[in-house]
Image (spheres, rainbow, N blue to C red):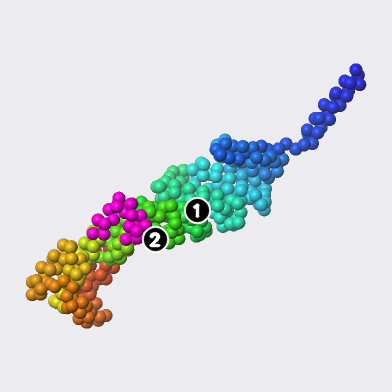
Amino acid sequence: MIHTHWRRIFTAWLLVAVATLIPARAETYELQEGVFKEVESWPAGTPEYRLQQIRRLIAEEEYDDAIDLADEWIEDNPYHFLLPQALLLRGDAKAHEKNYFKALYDYEYIARAYPDSSAFFPALERELDIARTYGSGVRRKFWGMRILPAGDEAEELFIRIQERTPGSRLAERAGKALGDFYFQRKEMALAAEAFDIFLENHPRSQWRSDAMKKLIDANLATFKGPRFDATGLIEAQQRIESFKTDFPATSEQIGADALLVRIDESLAQKALVTAQWYDRKDRRVSARFMYRRVVRDYPGSSAAAEAKRRLGELGETVAPESAEASAEPEEAESQAPDDAEKMDQPPTQRPETAPDAEQADTPTQPEAEK
């Protein structure tokens, strides 16, 4: 009995000693199919163990403690191969506290210093999320209050992500978000450029239809009237024709044919304004040519009716597709102003201010609209 008792005591002591020698291990969990599952364990005190503790604190919403522990980890392991992961976790804790600008410092450090690490794309994903947040109108903190506009930061982040991951799905999302950002802010010239680049870089994007519609709207919005640049109208016209080919059902829903009619009417009005300018300058050869051009190119427009009326006043009978109309351009071109006659130029859509002697009569952008 005595020997049995001591044998039990020795066995218990041995088990305690073995348990003491075996290092404690951290429980590691990973989100899989919406559920956290244990995937790996690390000895206590190791860098991997401490990183897992940071993850646990973030999961428990103890963000301040997570940031403190991440600060210690980074200070203790400045050259560790898991440093990008520590930076990512610290940035995540800051972002969860809605300190987005501070979080960007960690994400940007990863993007610049560790482009080959596994944390690179997750860091850019976080940057895209912050850019969307700033782009939606959320302001930066200053002295604890959100009072600083952050639109410039959002714009820069959208552009940087595309530059750093060209051709990727992430770049595609950032490019679309940049176009939407400009579009929502009514910066239509920039929106048109952003969507144009997006469609060129991602021709098979799932957002191609939406991007083309917004590109058309943005181009139309850049047209300020018949005295101004018609480039946006012409590009919108071309895009609508492409849209009708690529998305025939959707083009009917948005009224593509009606848009083309509106564009033709606007281009006709622009040509009519040019003809009237020549008319006021007594440049009758050029005026007749432009009036005929309006009638020929936009026969069903209200501008064509006005052009016919004026041609009749000038004693000219309008004959559709006449040989004279096709021969007129050379004569009109010979009457067109050269560099020495710039004050006689017809209105241009990128308004060039005429010399003072002619400024009052030359159609140009009003001072208040410049």
Q: Which of the numbered marks, if any, corresponds to residue 196?
A: 2
Residue depicted at x 32% and y 63%: 238
In the displayed structure, does residue 136 sit left or right of residue 255?
Answer: right
| Residue 187 visible somewhere in the drawing | no
The stretch in magenta equals 241-261
Q: Is residue 248 left or right of residue 320?
A: right
Q: Is residue 209 magenta?
A: no
Against 36, residue 7 (above or below) is above
Judging by the rendered image, the residue that carries numbered circle 1 is: 170
SS under mark 1: helix
x, y (%) of residue 74?
A: 63, 48
Q: Could you tell which of marks 1 and 2 lies nearer the N-terminus?
A: 1
Name the kind of residue labelled 2 in the image: Asp
- The prevailing secondary structure element of the residues shown in magenta is helix
Q: Residues within 10 Å of mark 2 (few under 14, many from 20)?
A: some
Mark 2: which secondary structure?
helix
Quarter assignment of residue 219: bottom left
Q: Is residue 262 left or right of residue 314?
A: right
At 70% from the left and 41% from the top, the residue drawn is 42
